[in-house]
């Protein structure tokens, strides 16, 4: 097997390539002791910062504090694949069962508008995050994937995607992407590429300028609900923040908080970025539309052509660590780097000689039923949003606007969406969840291998994995 071409500047970890490009942000001061505000938000990723942004815009005199253990954008928000898309992660039927199909379709349409909303705010606030709405192209590279992709498009057209929103295209339709062995492709305009760290850094600066107190290097050890006359509070090693509402926006890190270990499974995802791809190679590949690009494998990959003409590609890394301990600095394991590179070169053989310059990983949150939620409990004063399972770039913006309405007690179209107030059972205790995630992952990989042979249909192993995982 060919060795992976590695750049002399290769780095593994250091949070992400996106920060390497940008430089690590200046650190804001930590909390200086006990304090008091109207809304305290724990976690300064997209969820926390969008919530702070919309609250301040709606009610400028509201006192809002955001606390982060490390720095704003340290988590998945500063590490992701930069797909700002209307993709929905969980089974739509879950929401239709509780709220009816029309409510789920309204949710899907709201997500499509969210792709525009993020770009509108970036424009209005002068946040330069390399946003480019080129849409999303999904490709199939064998008969089983083609069958699955075709069925998926038919399915989605019953759930809020009309033909203009998503349709099959000829794999070589111009402007094309030279994907090896593409047997089918689909296109949706509802996606943009983004430089994730630029977006989260820009948001942090924006909310600070609006008057939000942003504390970094401050670890929240406990979130306390309202108890009688005692106000809700975020307890840290440096002091306690009392507020009318405390919002938990810690997605993949939620399992580290007391009492929440089994709520959302921290799933690790890994990425690699190449050196800038030379012009003569781009001439062979095409990709002039700069769509975000995904395949239809069970162990899928997602890629973007970056503003400076690299390819950043992500997939599953070591999905779940025993005991749900998330990783900190984002180093990724050699076999995950090798898998990503093989997938990339499998799709785009023309980049086989382009060196890999950076590898990293991050953690996202997966609820037991793979369906995201947002809620605010008026009794306890506590709110939360997350469990986006890898689709949080757009969804966190929708969550931020929904939390604004819930905090301000507004009944709106957003607070009526079916993910509001949804309760999900927890994950199984260890070692069951570790064994379960390893088995499903193994089954999906074997299914992919079988499908890359002569099989015309989705492997039964994938069906088994889906049943075990409950997805
Ligand atoms: C490698 C990777 C690729 C991805 N690709 C995509 C993609 O292309 N498109 C997409 O839509 N989604 C993608 N996702 C998912 C998406 O990035 C996340 O769903 C989203 O960023 C979650 O935002 P968040 O603000 O809820 O959480 P985070 O960004 O993880 O922020 C949580 C914050 O909470 C802080 N925190 C945690 N615990 C504490 C504590 N005790 N006290 C104080 N602060 C605390 C952390 O430091 C962190 O800054 C990807 C995720 C990963 C990891």
Image (tube, rainbow, N blue to C red):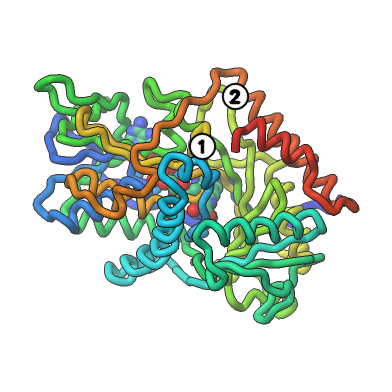
Of residues 395 and 148, the one nearer the viewer is 148
On screen, 430 above or below 63? above
Of residues 69 and 466, the one nearer the viewer is 466
Q: Where is residue 220 in the image (x, y as percent from the top left)?
A: 30, 30
**Residue at point 61% right, 18% down?**
431
Element assignment for label 2: helix
Relative to 425, 410 lies left or right: left
**Residue at point 47% right, 63% down?**
194
**Residue at point 31% right, 66% down?**
121
Q: Can residue 280 be seen in this view?
A: no
Q: Position of residue 22 (x, y in %)?
A: 44, 60
Q: Where is residue 40 in the image (x, y as percent from the top left)?
A: 22, 38
Q: Mark 2 points at which residue?
A: 433
Q: In which quarter of the image is ligand 1?
A: top left
Relative to 223, 385 lies left or right: right
On screen, 361 above or below 258? below
**Which of the 4 quarters of the picture holds residue 81?**
bottom right
Element assignment for label 1: strand
User: For the C terminus, which image quadrant?
Assistant: top right
Q: Position of residue 237 (x, y in %)?
A: 27, 25
Q: State the CA–CA distance, disc 2 to disc 1.
A: 12 Å
**Residue at point 48% right, 38% down?**
365
Q: Mark 1 points at which residue?
A: 366
Q: Residues within 10 Å of mark 1 (few under 14, many from 20)?
A: many
């Amino acid at each position: 097997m060919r060795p992976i071409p590695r750049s002399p500047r290769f780095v593994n970890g250091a949070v992400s390539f996106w920060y390497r490009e940008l430089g690590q942000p200046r650190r804001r001061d930590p909390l200086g002791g006990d304090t008091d505000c109207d809304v305290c938000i724990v976690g300064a990723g997209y969820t926390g910062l969008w919530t702070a942004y919309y609250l301040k815009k709606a009610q400028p005199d509201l006192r809002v504090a955001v606390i982060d253990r490390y720095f704003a954008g340290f988590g998945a928000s500063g590490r992701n694949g930069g797909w700002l898309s209307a993709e929905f992660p969980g089974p739509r039927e879950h929401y239709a069962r509780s709220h009816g199909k029309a409510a789920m379709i309204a949710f899907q349409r709201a997500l499509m508008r969210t792709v525009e909303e993020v770009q509108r705010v970036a424009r209005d606030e002068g946040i330069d995050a390399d946003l480019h709405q080129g849409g999303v192209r999904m490709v199939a590279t064998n008969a089983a994937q083609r069958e699955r992709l075709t069925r998926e498009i038919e399915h989605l057209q019953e759930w809020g995607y009309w033909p203009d929103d998503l349709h099959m295209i000829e794999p070589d339709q111009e402007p094309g992407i030279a994907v090896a062995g593409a047997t089918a492709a689909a296109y949706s305009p509802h996606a943009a590429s983004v430089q994730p760290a630029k977006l989260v850094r820009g948001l942090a600066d924006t909310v600070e300028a609006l008057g939000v107190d942003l504390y970094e290097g401050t670890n929240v050890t406990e979130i306390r609900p309202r108890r009688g006359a005692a106000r809700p509070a975020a307890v840290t090693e440096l002091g306690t923040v009392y507020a009318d509402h405390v919002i938990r926006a810690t997605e993949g890190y939620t399992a580290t908080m007391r009492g929440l270990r089994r709520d959302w499974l921290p799933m690790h995802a890994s990425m690699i970025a190449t050196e800038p791809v030379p012009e003569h190679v781009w001439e062979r590949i095409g990709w002039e539309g700069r769509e975000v690009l995904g395949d239809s494998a069970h162990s899928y990959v997602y890629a973007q052509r970056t503003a400076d003409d690299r390819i950043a590609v992500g997939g599953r890394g070591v999905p779940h660590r025993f005991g749900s301990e998330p990783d900190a600095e984002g180093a990724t394991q050699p076999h995950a780097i090798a898998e990503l590179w093989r997938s990339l070169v499998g799709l785009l053989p023309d980049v086989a000689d382009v060196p890999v310059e950076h590898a990293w990983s991050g953690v996202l949150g997966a609820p037991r039923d793979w369906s995201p939620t947002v809620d605010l409990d008026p009794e306890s004063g506590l709110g939360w949003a997350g469990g986006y399972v890898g689709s949080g770039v757009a969804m966190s913006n929708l969550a931020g606007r929904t939390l604004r309405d819930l905090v301000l007690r507004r009944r709106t179209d957003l607070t009526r969406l079916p993910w509001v107030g949804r309760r999900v059972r927890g994950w199984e205790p260890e070692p069951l969840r570790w064994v379960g995630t390893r088995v499903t992952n193994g089954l999906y990989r074997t299914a992919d291998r079988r499908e890359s042979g002569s099989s015309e249909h989705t492997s039964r192993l994938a069906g088994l994995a889906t049943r075990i995982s409950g997805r």
